Amino acid sequence: MNTTPYYTKIRRLFASFKKNLRIKINKYNWEFHFYVFVFSLCFSVSVFIILMISLHLSFKMPNTTAINWFTVHKYPKQQDIFYFIFGFPFILVLSIIIWMLTLWVKKR
Amino acid sequence: MGKKEIILIIAIIIFSVLIGQSTSGNIFFGDLNMIDEGQFAAWANHMLHGKMMYKDLYIVYGPLYVYPLYLLFKILSPSAFLVRLYLTLGGTFGIIAIYFVMVELKLNRIVKSLLLILFLCLPMLNLRESMAIWCLYFLLKTTTKSSKHSFLILGILSSITLLVSQDFGIFILLVSAFHLFYSRLFAHNTLNKHGIRDYIVGYVTIIICFTGWAFKEGWLLDYIRVATGVSVDLSSINVPNGQNFPNPLSYFALHTVGMNVKYFFSKDVLLYVSILVYFASFFYLTVNYVKRKLVNTNYKLLLVTLYGILLYCILLTRNGIGHYYYTLPAVLLICGYFLNQLLFINKKITLLSSALTIVILSFFIRLLYLNNPELKQSLNIHNYLPIHTNNPYRVGIINISKSQATKISLLQTFIFKNTKKSDYVFFFNDEPMMYMLVDRVNPTDYDLPFAGNTLDKRIKMLNQVAMKKPKYIFIDNDVWAVDGINNKTRLPELTKYLYSHYHLIKTTNNVQIFQFI
């Protein structure tokens, strides 16, 4: 009966994945990684924009007694914060995933 | 510290003070910034009149940003020149820290010089940012030299930063926490065993000292109330100043091809360039992490990037040019790091490395061009020569424009002639500098009336005006309306009260003077 805890398995799996990736990374020079990064970034930004447009997000004006540019122009400020907090990690993580997948496909 | 470094620091101070740019401009010439400089002048002057920080004054920064100026006013007597000098030296203090951060990042001499020129020519640093950069320096130092003192100093500086500015203090606290826990969990060899303990000891010691001082002076609870209120308001819909983050997609949809091409060189796009730099940095760090090449300098780059990202959040609400400059130090340090890699670490020069070098240098030139008008002024020797034989009272030796000097003199003459020192006067627009220049007290807590923009603050302001009955209220119709919204729109209750209880007695230089009926 295998008694290895699940987190040890995950850790081993991650270490093995990292090792394989490292071998593949070292095969290519930095310029290759740069081009993949540019491509993946453009792709991720496009995916993010399409996703946001297709979701038809609407932000309500929060209740406030304040008078400022946002309330005068009825602009829900939280939408900028949402797009940044959600968009930045989304684009970054997706770009890194694409980069990893590219390396994986390239090897095959 | 070597002899060369001492000479360099002296050169930085001389250049920064004489012809460099602070957030308030050159110390010898340029009109008084009625808002940014003015708020400090008003707070310190009101403290000389016996008002207490936070209790009687709505201060959006930490007490240690304002109190030194109050002491300077007390020792040397108030003047606008002293305010500008204080703010300039605050920035200079940060440029010195930037130099040491660059040393920690092991940047080549040429890259360091290039970045120093940018830091001296662009108004990026003020005291609160400078404190954060010093913290960053000690943070980077703890990654290599783990001694008890480094963590203790870091803890002390982090808490001082919090007391200078809440937002910068929080950013530094978050980056320090990341570093302390990351190092503890993943890099046992580089961290002093008692790092976290020493950091907490340093941090708490300052907080305890501060608590005792503020409690003794009687404004501790007011400080906590205002500081938490300001921190919440700045990140919510209640923020007094700020506009939407520019959206290029909506711009492209509304403009012609030519305009869209032009847009790529606009200031709005620079906001996205910063994001691109952070993406590049994270990607670079990820590749090196997987390659097991997350060496010490790369880890330092990670800390700088984290600090930069947190700082960037300021721009989500307040993305004007002034705040944009504040967020640049981390971006420039990352660009300098990449430039160093391209030119001096990666010795093989290729088409791509040359292209990237040109792109980074173009970005630097674009930034310099952004501040082109001020730089041109600084290089014009005539601006340093005095143009007035008699500057208005309390302006000091700054060369200000004739129109500003006339306006200040007219108001001073009127107020000195018609009021006593104990009389209240109220400047309805955002020009707090006038309180210091006329040496009179504001009846309200709000030297910048636009900052009291929520209903409870507006009512408080109205009650204070109604209770203390300022003899005169001034409305300057030339004054810059923050975000294009004037104070008549921002403060409807006070405007109504003004027109029902005061009558217009005079208009001078487009300033309306209202007298209590």
Image (tube, grey):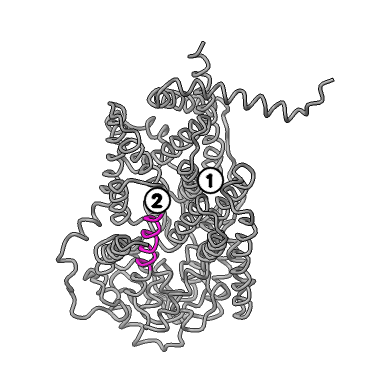
**Percent of width and height locating residue B98:** 39, 55
The vertical placement of B457 against B358, above or below, is below
Q: Secondary structure at mark 1?
A: loop
Q: Is residue B488 visible?
A: no
Q: Residue furthest top?
A: A108
The vertical placement of B47 against A62, above or below, is below
User: Residue B329's mark?
Assistant: 2
Bin the neighbour count of mark 1 within 10 Å (Cα to Cα): few under 14, some 14-19, many 20 and up. Answer: many
Quick check: do tags 1 and 2 share a chain? no
User: Residue A77's mark?
Assistant: 1
Horizontal arrangement in the rendering, residue A67 relative to residue B503 (left or right): right
Residue under the image location 64 percent in, 44 percent down: B185
Is residue B98 highlighted in magenta? yes
Screen quadrant of the N terminus of chain B:
bottom left
Please provide the residue range marked out in magenta: B87-100
Observer-nearest residue: B135 or B500?
B135
Is residue B502 highlighted in magenta? no
